Each structure stands twice: as C-alpha cells, then as structure tokens.
Amino acid sequence: MLDAVRKVGNVFLKDYKQNNIPQTMDDLLKQLEDIDTLCLSSLKKDLALQYPNIPWHIGDEFDTDAQRNPADKEQYWLCDAMDGAIQYLQHIAGWTINLALIRDGKPLFSVIFDPLSNEMFWAKDGEGAFINDKLLELSNKTDQSIMLAVFEYGHQDKSKTDLNEKIGTTVTRLIQNFGIVRNYGPHGLQLAYVGAGRIDLFVQQDLDTYNWIAGLLIAKEAGAEILTTAGDSWKWGSESLLVAQKSITEKYLKIKSII
C-alpha cells in the first residue's frame, strides 16, 4: 500500500509545475479530472495485485450527503485522489496522495504521502502512527501564545445555513486566544501534522469526512483527541471536527464556553 501511494505521488512530483495554471472553469475541471484519472488508475492497478477483492469507493467532497455515512460495504478503499489538487495546479506546495482502507465503517489503515517533502505518514488502527519509520509524537506545549492553530472549511453548501458565521466566529476565537493561526490547505496533511507535533490544534466547522478520514486515523493513533467542536466524540457524519492533544482541546472548549 505504501509503495503504491509513493509510486503515483512521485509521478505527480515529476510533472509538478509543468501544467499551465488554469484560467477558466472548464480548464480547471479538466485538469482536476486528469489528476483523478491518473491517480486512481495507478493505485487500482498496483493494489489489485495484492488485494484483488477489495472494492473501491471514490470520495467526492462536493457530495455532502454521501459523506454522512460509510459506504455499505464490509471493507473498501476510500480515495479522494489528490488532497490539495488546487495547490498542485497553482504551482504551490500543499498537496498529497491520501488513501484509507475502511473496514466495518471505520478506518483500519491510512496513508498520506507528501512527495515534495518525501514524507510518508501512515497508521494502522491500534498499532500507532508513523512518519516514514519514525513513531509520531504530539506537541507538548502548554503556552497558548506559541501554539499553532489551524482552521479549515470544506465544500458543504453554506448559502442557507449559519456556517459562514460559525467559521468566522471560530477564526476570531482562534486569533484572540492562540499565538499563531493559519489556514494551510490540505486537510489530511494538517491532521497528520497534529500527530507529528507540528500543528497544535485543528478545527473545522462543516462536514468534510472524505478530506478528514485518512488524517484522522493518523492523529488518533498518535494520541490526539478526535472530537466535534461541541466536545463530543467524533463519529462518521459529524459536522465539525476538533483535533489536538487532550490538554489543548480542553483549553479550546473552555475558551468557547466563556465567549
């Protein structure tokens, strides 16, 4: 599995910045489709050699309803092709190849490969999380003034809800209480960075299961709490996400409760 992901990631690395940055919607959609086709065809071909009977589920992050429940299959590969494809097409860093094996409605194994850094984040349920061959360790910071908090948002329709207001409130809360606040782009990689101690807190207010799932297992296996922004345990279909070591999620939830 790791070799298959590394192989296709390095194919994209070879072609990085060789495309013309899309200037129209038609061009953008065509290039995104080409990325999906190349990524999935390579992964399917290589993984079929060892796992011929495991079906595939292609995660469309624009399909909100499909993300509310796992697919009706005992086990399957879940792939959203390239996470951060927009960055790739814009010739900027922040794109990865993500893949997860889902069994009985939860991730069993996941991998996130960052070709630019040659870093492979991976985890197996109950067996820990790693970067290449090194065990991941969470941040041990206690001073919020030096903590790096990131916020994200997905493609859920915000036109008829209060999501935009929730996101704005979240960003304001982070800026007022954490020393460094960023929005980086690739959701899964940011969650893996929580596991690696590079990011102290990740928060998102809308549903984005397909972008989260590979990184969630990595962060969880590194020891992070996986919660909703209300402080409940995250489950498939939850419409918000809060990930950090326990002491930091407690700080965030306390801040939220008094503002």
Image (cartoon, rainbow, N blue to C red):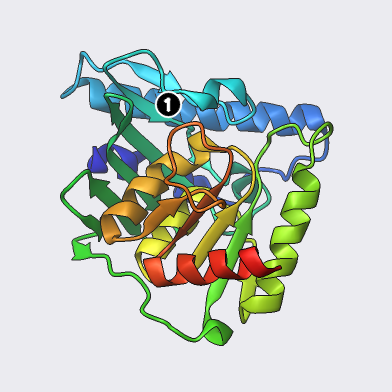
Q: Residue 51: horizontal and vertical position, in percent?
A: 19, 22
Instruction: Residue at the far front: name it.
Output: 258
Q: Residue 90: horizontal and vertical position, in percent?
A: 68, 50
Side of 157 relative to 138 (left or right): right
Q: Residue at x 83, y 31 (%)?
A: 160
The answer to whether residue 9 is seen in the rendering is no
Q: Residue 106: horizontal and vertical position, in percent?
A: 32, 32
Nearer to us in this view, 89 or 111: 111
**Residue hosting label 1:** 40
Q: Residue 210: horizontal and vertical position, in percent?
A: 49, 34
Disc 1 is placed on an element classified as: helix
Side of 206 relative to 25 (left or right): left
* Image position of 79 with respect to 250: above or below: above
* Image position of 215 with respect to 102: above or below: below
* Image position of 65 with respect to 217: above or below: above
The answer to whether residue 59 is seen in the rendering is yes
Q: Residue at x 41, y 72 (%)?
A: 247
The N terminus sits in image quarter: top left
Side of 199 relative to 155 (left or right): left
Q: Residue at x 70, y 74 (%)?
A: 175
Side of 113 relative to 183 (left or right): left
The C terminus sits in image quarter: bottom right
* Image position of 8 with respect to 193: above or below: above
Q: Residue at x 59, y 42 (%)?
A: 85
Residue density around tag 1, few if under 14, some if 14–19, many if 20 or more, within 10 Å: some
